Image (cartoon, rainbow, N blue to C red):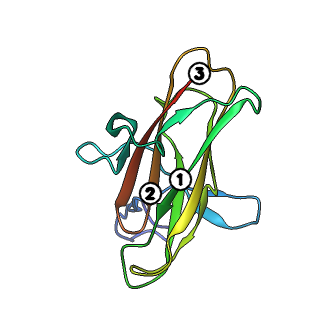
Amino acid sequence: MQTEGGGGADTEEEEVPMQQYALNLEGHFKPQVGFMPHVFRVDGDFATGDAKYALKYDAATGSAASEVEVCGIGPSYEDFVAGFAPTSDPGWSVDPQDGCLDVNGGDNDVLNVRYTGLCDAPKFGTLVVVLPTENHSWTFKFRVEP
């Protein structure tokens, strides 16, 4: 692009790759991340038979619930976002979906996982917890059965 005033050199604006951000309800910006499961590592899996990940549907409440504990990996508090991979069956949720993890060696933070909806057959969900500034994630695989 030619600069104004003539005689100026041609310049181009350099595009700087930036992470996408969205404004959340509290007016803060949070990174938009894709909740893609870790390819080589699973931190919790229903296939092990662990009741924390292999859930039983409670027809009286119309749901199944569990908890996952995570802690920061570094010497300072770290922001996280959590959500279910797009391959998960509808009905899975996690609370909180974002926040700040304690330091490595500090108190574990608890994420509440819930499945609500019909459960006439096994339903699968893959929870991904991401530390956007650390390029780190955890992957947890859940199954709920009627």
How would you rate the neighbour count of disc 2 (Cα within 10 Å): few for under 14, some for 14-19, many for 20 or more? many
Amino acid on which the number 3 mark rests in the picture: Pro
Q: Distance between the residues labelled 3 and 1?
A: 26 Å
Q: Is residue 73 visible?
A: yes
Q: Which one is in front in this view, the residue at disc 3 or the one at disc 1?
A: 3
- Residue at x 62%, y 29% (from the top left corner): 57
Secondary structure under tag 2 reads strand
Amino acid on which the number 1 mark rests in the picture: Ala
Q: Position of residue 32 (x, y in %)?
A: 53, 52
Q: How far apart are marks 2 and 3 (CA)?
A: 30 Å
Picture layout, residue 51 above or below residue 59? below
Q: Do the residues labelled 2 and 1 touch (CB within 8 Å)?
A: yes
Would you identify the image quadrant in which residue 14 lies? bottom left
Q: The C terminus appears in which quarter of the rendering?
A: top right
Would you identify the image quadrant in which residue 134 lies? bottom left
As drawn, the label of residue 63 is none
As drawn, the label of residue 146 is 3
Q: The N terminus appears in which quarter of the rendering?
A: bottom left
How would you rate the neighbour count of disc 3 (Cα within 10 Å): few for under 14, some for 14-19, many for 20 or more? some
Going by the picture, which residue comes out furthest to the left? 40
As drawn, the label of residue 82 is 1
Task: Identify the residue position indicated by label 2 in the image.
Answer: 130
